[in-house]
Image (cartoon, rainbow, N blue to C red):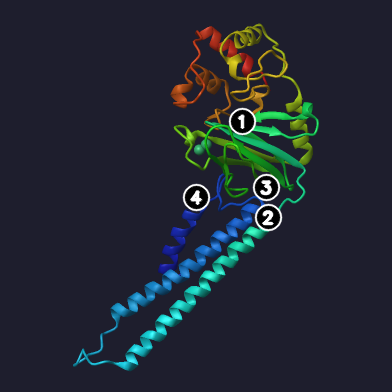
Amino acid sequence: MNKCGLILFSGIVPALSGCAGIQSALDPAGPAAATLFRLIWSFSALCLVIWMLVIAALAATIVRQPQARPEPLRLNHRHDLAAQRIVAIATLLTAIVLVVLTLASFLANRSLAAIGNEPGVTIEVIGHQWWWELRYQNDEPSKIVTTANEIHIPIGEPIRLVVSSTDVIHSFWVPSLAGKLDLIPGRSNILTLQADTAGIYRGQCAEFCGAQHAHMGMLVVAEPRPVFEAWLNHQLEPAQPPRTASQEVGQHLFLIRTCVMCHRIAGTLAGGTVGPNLTHIASRKTLAAAALPMSRGSLAAWLADPQGIKTGAHMPTSLLDGDELNQIVAYLEHLK
Ligand code: CUA
């Protein structure tokens, strides 16, 4: 490899390796993301070629010696004709490029629409400031699973997401799996999501929606069908009853303090629907819309100072002493 190639290569490889990962449109893991990936690269490659041609023409003009013109006011028909031809060719090429790009967009749109004509799983995704409510649809109301911020899907199947919002406009975006779609209050939009590789993908709200827009993340866990079904069946079960004295007190505190006003824990008297459903909160990998990893420490920190972690979030600071905090955390971390 020559020196120039080496410089280019050493620049591109680290730059592109930064594009891999669980939240990257340049690292597709499903058919929709792959279609968009091809579209991004074809646009970028074509634009790069055009840019290089323009720069080459500019360089040639700068380098070339201007012809000596003893009488600058005299018309030069040959010169004018050549200039006209160049402009005509450039206009034609521009038109062709526009048509090619439009066609590429149209074809990409068509293949996006072709994904998932018969989805097996339908999930309602409801945007809230600043978290995601998820409802797995079922014809039997008792089999509807409600959870938050962590979407489990079976691999290799188109998943139908019906997205809407209760407050402001949000935007659902899991770059590794599909394009963006807005969540609009009073309206339902449909997005098809498909993951072909098992794994965990990160998503992010992609429309500014207030103070904690940046902390409105989510995870998509793509897994084989049997694992997904086991997860779904487990989510349908009511919460684990407390096992230790500490968990027992924790549950009691949960039910007599403000927690109960906003959160639901199936199998208890807590039936709030303002905040995330906590029936199986400890089975999730993150807390506070992917702002914190799920752990005892995170739960305690979030309960003790939600406003310090997500300023402006609708979760109020609860007035708990150290023992009470420990007991509620003991109860919540037991809700697998
Ligand atoms: Cu929700 Cu940004």
In the image, residue 61 sits, relative to residue 219, either above or below, namely below
The residue furthest front is 186
Q: CA distance from mark 2 to mark 4?
A: 30 Å
Residue 84 located left or right of residue 143? left
Mark nearer the N terminus (1 vs 4): 4
Mark nearer the N terminus (2 vs 4): 4
Closer to us: mark 1 or mark 4? Answer: 1
Q: Which residue bears the numbered disc 1?
A: 285
Mark sitting on residue 192:
3
* Amino acid type, callout 4: Gly
> Where in the figure is residue 99, as x and y percent of width and height?
55, 70
Q: Is residue 63 visible?
A: yes
Give the total number of marks visible in the rendering. Answer: 4
* Disc 4 within 8 angstroms of ligand 1 (CB): no
> Where in the figure is residue 42, as x and y percent of width and height?
55, 64
Nearer-the-camera pick, 192 or 323: 192
> Where in the figure is residue 284, as x and y percent of width and height?
64, 29
* Amino acid type, callout 1: Lys
> Where in the figure is residue 332, as x and y percent of width and height?
62, 18
